[in-house]
Amino acid sequence: GLQCGIVGLPNVGKSTLFNCLSNARAQAANFPFCTIEPNVGVITVPDERLTKLTELVSPQRVVPNVIEIVDIAGLVKGASKGEGLGNQFLGNIRATNAIIHVLRCFDDDNVIHVDGSVDPIRDKEIIDTELQLKDLDSVEKKLQKVEKAAKTGDKEAKKAFDVLTAYREHLLSGKSARTAQVAEEDQEYIEDLWLLTAKPVMYVCNVGESDVNTGNAYVEKVREAVKEENAEVLIISAQIESEIAQMDTYEERQMFLDDLGLEQSGVTKLIKAAYRLLNLATYFTAGVQEVRAWTINEGFTAPQAAGVIHTDFEKGFIRAEVIKYADFVKYGSEAACKEAGKLSVEGKTYVVEDGDIMHFRFNV
Ligand code: GDP
């Protein structure tokens, strides 16, 4: 499955958040979670459209999208040099598809900070530096491999050498691979390196209870520091989330959120943002047996989307019948959409749009 890794210095609130995610009671009724390893959880992605389709179709079964969240503990200064099992944790990050970087933005004298004071910008730089050093290592190793061929005139090797050198300079200047100005087609030269700092990132500012609506000065500093990165900055209070996780009923949780002036829990916000971060799209199948959300990449064609259900669907693809989500809601059923001329028949080149309700026809 697709994985988001939670990273951050010790004591910033990572485990608290992970535990809230893993606590099914923290969530709306239909919100299963299972822990596959102590630090890996499979989490349902909340999607109002799926809820709406379920109301309309009343299927026997509903299957939502899921993503995996990994709590990557133990990143400390020196991790790239193997401090504190550093290399092992960095290896865990390599396996993820995106990074959730938690920053401590709350004051609390009872919670020790590893560096003695609350400073999310410094914290972020410590983590970034470790990841960048690790990436520098990977880039330099590959540079050594291609250097000889590049110097003897091999054109492809020369190109690889130049691109890798650009990444090397960028990393050496204390920046992450994701912000390097490298042409899209040239990024293939680093793809095999699975660079840690090339993965998409979002920042979660963990604030005290009273700052959850407004943020605080720490959050403003974070926003300022990451403004070039084009990354989402979420404000969450892990403390509030763990209080919500203690509550038994949906009504109780909803009332608590209302009192705080929050529309949804931080956990819900976080999962939705993580799904966005992975740059995925969703299509639905909506039959009486099963209403289901399917995860695809942006730009998938109809046969590729069918292949997510089963490889045979892709191989034997004939056509797809497509209903737009808004039409399905407006007319209420597949039959009604068909009658209203809102069911379109699409071929192999159709690019599936987020929210499409698909019905595939195929040969077996
Ligand atoms: P991790 O090392 O990043 O996984 O941090 P933990 O989740 O274990 O949290 C470290 C300590 O900070 C624990 O004692 C938490 O109860 C506390 N903590 C976490 N989030 C908050 C918060 O939002 N506010 C306050 N005051 N304490 C928090």
Image (tube, grey):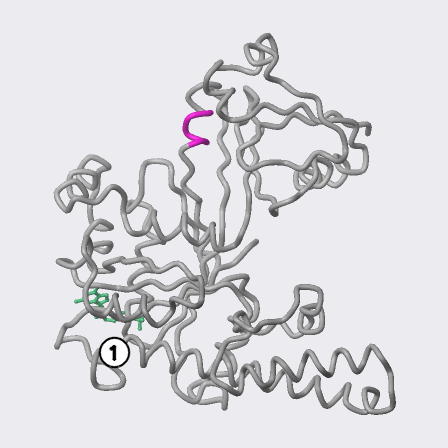
Q: Position of residue 149 (x, y in %)?
A: 84, 87
Residue at 54% in and 70% down: 178
Q: Position of residue 259 (x, y in %)?
A: 12, 43
Please give left or right for residue 79 compared with residue 289 in the image: left
Please give left or right for residue 134 compared with residue 316 in the image: left
Majority secondary structure of magenta residues: helix
Which portion, as a residue range, is magenta?
49-53
Q: Amino acid at mark 1?
A: Asp
Residue at 70% in and 86% down: 143
The residue under label 1 is 119
Given residues 348 and 84, the one toward you in this image is 348
Q: Position of residue 6 (x, y in %)?
A: 41, 65
Where disc 1 sits, the SS reads: loop
Q: Position of residue 299 (x, y in %)?
A: 64, 44
Residue at the right extreme, as displayed: 153
Given residues 147 and 245, the one toward you in this image is 147
Given residues 355 and 27, the one toward you in this image is 355
Determine crowd level at label 1: few under 14, some 14-19, many 20+ residues with C-alpha closer than 10 A: some
